Image (spheres, helix red, strand yellow):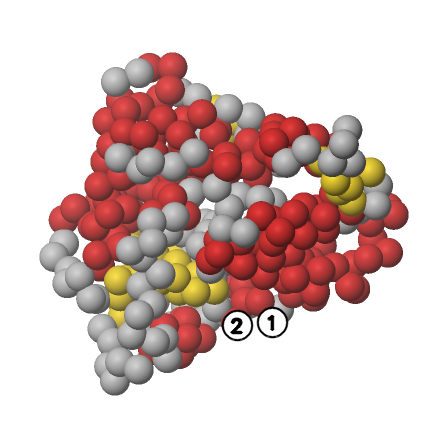
């Protein structure tokens, strides 16, 4: 273990109300004059551009909703990060971890929620020099995060700054990209925060960075499991009590596949995925799911995936 760590935790505020809600242990980070459509992108990027920080200094930037979404305070985050092993570069505090466990990757999830997102994310990955097919990648709880709920070493944030600068240049050169919107909870919002919130996950696809999900978030599964259930899929609610362990098991299969490259683990993940009555059946008809079924020569039933007969 590292005996001491330099850890700085910031909470972004947008007005007097959000400033007044800053919890003890967080440093205020002003975004009162920042463009609202960019959400946390501008204050984080501005801080990283204007301030010196060491590669081994730990930094975290959180929205005012962090405590409400996770039930955690600064003292919880500090305790978790302080206890990390030497070879860990980032700690992840995603509240909606069930979405990461359920989908093959965070970009499949993004495309499901915000059509068109993955093409822009792939364009960004290509321009940033990442040789990754995002839709074929595998996300796990230890390699993906939502909402920038992450505390990471300075060297990680330098890479984030480099990629986000590429993205800001990319959209400033294209008026259509700059004004691009998507629906979120029925409201038209800028697409940019949903793309940039996936930059940490893009970075963590690179094996030179190692992250770990906070146990303090995962143990709160019962509080957040309903976030991944479709209110119209009534029959899915019967598995609410047991779904948490199913999701963690599915994520373990993805981790095993990422570590070994053995398709048997990815097959087992998809067996859960095509069986689980989460949201509704049509969620299994994403392009990622159909691509997997085609390439692995399976067909899907309500009981999961079935290998085609070898002679067929």
**Residue 56, percent across and down?**
20, 66
Instruction: Say the numbered circle drawn on residue 134.
Output: none
**Residue 88, percent across and down?**
33, 68
Residue 32 is at least partly visible in this image:
no
Q: Is residue 141 left or right of residue 211?
A: right
Nearer to us in this view, 35 or 288? 288
Residue 90 is at least partly visible in this image:
yes
Q: Quadrant of the N terminus?
A: bottom left
Among the 4 quarters of the image, the one containing residue 62: bottom left
- Distance from disc 1 to disc 2, alpha carbons, whole Å, reads 6 Å
Among the 4 quarters of the image, the one containing residue 164: top left
* Contact? badges 1 and 2 (CB < 8 Å): yes
Q: Secondary structure at mark 1?
A: loop
Residue in the picture at 48% in, 29% down? 117
Q: Residues within 10 Å of mark 2 (few under 14, many from 20)?
A: some
Residue in the picture at 31% in, 57% down? 209
Residue in the picture at 83% in, 53% down? 237
**Residue, disc 1:** 219
**Residue, disc 2:** 216
Among the 4 quarters of the image, the one containing residue 161: top left
- Eyeballing the image, is 290 above or below 176? below
Q: Is residue 73 left or right of residue 128?
A: right
Q: Secondary structure at mark 2?
A: helix
- Eyeballing the image, is 94 above or below 103? below
Nearer to us in this view, 250 or 224? 250
Label total for image: 2
Nearer to us in this view, 54 or 275? 275
Residue in the picture at 21% in, 66% down? 57
Q: Is residue 169 left or right of residue 256?
A: left
**Residue 149, percent across and down?**
43, 57
Residue lying furthest bottom in this view? 3
């Amino acid at each position: 273990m590292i005996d001491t760590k330099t850890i700085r935790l910031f909470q972004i505020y947008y007005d007097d109300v959000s400033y007044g809600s800053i919890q003890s242990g967080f440093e205020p980070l002003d975004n009162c004059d920042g463009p609202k459509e960019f959400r946390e992108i501008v204050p984080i990027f501005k801080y990283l551009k204007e301030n010196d920080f060491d590669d081994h200094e730990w930094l975290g930037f959180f929205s005012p909703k962090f405590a409400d979404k996770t039930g955690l305070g600064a003292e919880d985050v500090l305790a978790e990060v302080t206890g990390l092993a030497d070879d860990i570069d980032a700690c992840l505090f995603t509240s909606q971890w069930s979405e990461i466990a359920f989908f093959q990757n965070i970009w499949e999830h993004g495309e499901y929620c915000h059509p068109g997102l993955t093409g822009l994310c792939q364009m960004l990955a290509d321009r940033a020099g990442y040789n990754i097919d995002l839709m074929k990648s595998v996300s796990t709880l230890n390699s993906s995060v939502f909402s920038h709920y992450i505390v990471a070493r300075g060297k990680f944030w330098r890479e984030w700054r480099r990629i986000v600068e590429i993205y800001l240049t990319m959209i400033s050169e294209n008026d259509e990209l700059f004004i691009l919107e998507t629906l979120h909870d029925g409201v038209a919002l800028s697409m940019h925060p949903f793309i940039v919130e996936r930059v940490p996950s893009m970075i963590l696809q690179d094996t030179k960075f190692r992250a770990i999900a906070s146990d303090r978030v995962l143990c709160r599964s019962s509080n957040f499991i309903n976030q991944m259930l479709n209110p119209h899929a009534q029959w899915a609610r019967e598995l609410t009590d047991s779904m948490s362990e199913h999701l963690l098991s599915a994520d373990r299969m993805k981790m095993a596949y990422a570590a070994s490259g053995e398709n048997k683990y990815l097959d087992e993940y998809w067996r859960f995925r095509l069986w689980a009555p989460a949201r509704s059946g049509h969620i299994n008809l994403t392009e990622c799911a159909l691509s997997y079924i085609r390439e692995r020569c399976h067909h899907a039933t309500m009981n999961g995936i079935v290998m085609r007969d070898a002679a067929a």
